[in-house]
C-alpha cells in the first residue's frame, strides 16, 4: 500500500493484560521503526527492523516488550503484562533507506490505554 | 547526552505573516536534520530534510536553515495560512549510529489566525 497502516486505532487493556499492535509498512520499504509517544509530544524510539531482521533495539524495554516483522505479515509490537506507564500512542514508520535520506513515513498510530 | 529543544510555547500568528520556529541541539553534531508536521490524532508527516553541508533548503512556502556553529535549525513558513496550524517537530538522527532512528524535539504548536 501507499501508506503505513496501523491497527487497531485504539486499544484498551487492564493492567497486567497483554497488548498487541500491528503495522503494515509501505510496499517496497525495507525498514520499519516503532516509536512511543507519551504525553503530548515526547517521542521515544523503541526498535527498528530491516526486513525481518532486528536492526536496532536499543530503545526496547526487553522485559515486557517484543516485536517481530515476518515475511508476508504485518509487523507486530507486543507488550506482556501491561503497566499504567505503557499508556501512550505507538507509532510505526517505514523507510526505504536509513542512510541520510532516511525519510520516515508514519502511520496514524495506535493509542494504548492501560487502566 | 544529546538534547533537542524547541520552543514549547505555542506560536500564534496572523494569516499572511511568516512563522519562524526554532530547533536547538546540544552535545552532538547531527549529519542531517528533518522537520515533520503533526496534526492532532495523526502521525508525523515529513516536510524537509537538510544536511550539515547545506545552509538552506526550500520547498514552496517552507524554508529550513541549518547553522552548525550555532547548533540551530530554523523553520520558516511564509505567507502562512490557517491550514498551516499544526505541531512542527524537529528530528535529527540519534547520534552517529546511522541506523536512522530519530530523536524528536517536543514540538512547537503553530496557530495561524485568519
Image: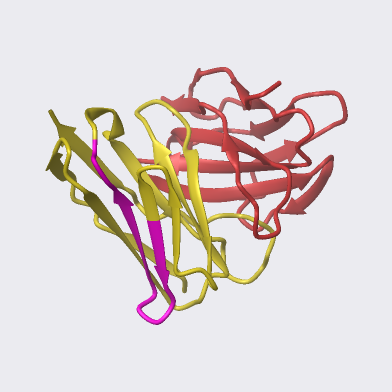
Residue A106 within the segment the image draws in magenta:
no
Snapshot quadrant of residue B102: bottom right
| Residue A5: percent from left, percent from top | 63, 22
Q: Nearer the viewer, residue A57 or B92?
A: B92
Residue at 73% over, 50% down: A97
Left or right of B50: which side holds B74?
Answer: left
| Residue A98: percent from left, percent from top | 70, 54
Q: Nearer the viewer, residue B48 or A29?
A: B48
Region in magenta: B64-80
Q: Quadrant of the C terminus of chain B?
A: top left
Is residue A40 visible in the rendered structure shown here?
Answer: no
Residue positioned most to the right? A71
Residue at 44% over, 44% down: B36
Relative to A84, is A2 above or below? above
Left or right of B57: which side holds A25?
Answer: right
Snapshot quadrant of residue A106: top right
Q: Colour of chain B?
A: yellow
Q: Nearer the viewer, residue B4 or B84?
A: B84
Is residue A95 visible in the rendered structure shown here?
Answer: yes
The chain painted red is: A
Left or right of B88: which side holds B8?
Answer: left
Residue B68 within the segment the image draws in magenta:
yes
Relative to A57, is B28 above or below? below
Q: Count every numbered label the image shows and give the total.
A: 0
Snapshot quadrant of residue B74: bottom left
Residue at 24% over, 32% down: B81
| Residue B19: percent from left, percent from top | 23, 49
Relative to B5, is A63 above or below? above
Amino acid at each position: 500500500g501507499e501508506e503505513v497502516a496501523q491497527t487497531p486505532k485504539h486499544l484498551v487493556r487492564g493492567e497486567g493484560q497483554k497488548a498487541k499492535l500491528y503495522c503494515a509498512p509501505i510496499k517496497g520499504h525495507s525498514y520499519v521503526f516503532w516509536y512511543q509517544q507519551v504525553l503530548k509530544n515526547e517521542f521515544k524510539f523503541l526498535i527498528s527492523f530491516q526486513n525481518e531482521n532486528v536492526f536496532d533495539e536499543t530503545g526496547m524495554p526487553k522485559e515486557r516488550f517484543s516485536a517481530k516483522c515476518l515475511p508476508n505479515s504485518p509487523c507486530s509490537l507486543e507488550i506482556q503484562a501491561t503497566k499504567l506507564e505503557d499508556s501512550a500512542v505507538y507509532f510505526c514508520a517505514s523507510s526505504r533507506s536509513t542512510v541520510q535520506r532516511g525519510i520516515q513515513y508514519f502511520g496514524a498510530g495506535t493509542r494504548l490505554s492501560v487502566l | 547526552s544529546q538534547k533537542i529543544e524547541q520552543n514549547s510555547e505555542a506560536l500564534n500568528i496572523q494569516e499572511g505573516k511568516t512563522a519562524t520556529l526554532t530547533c536547538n541541539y546540544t552535545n552532538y553534531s547531527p549529519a542531517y536534520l528533518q522537520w515533520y508536521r503533526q496534526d492532532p490524532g495523526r502521525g508525523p508527516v515529513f516536510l524537509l530534510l537538510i544536511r550539515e553541508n547545506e545552509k538552506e533548503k526550500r520547498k514552496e512556502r517552507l524554508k529550513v536553515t541549518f547553522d552548525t556553529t550555532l547548533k540551530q535549525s530554523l523553520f520558516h513558513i511564509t505567507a502562512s495560512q490557517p491550514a498551516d496550524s499544526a505541531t512542527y517537530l524537529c528530528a535529527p538522527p540519534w547520534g552517529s549510529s546511522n541506523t536512522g532512528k530519530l530523536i524528536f524535539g517536543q514540538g512547537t504548536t503553530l496557530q495561524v489566525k485568519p
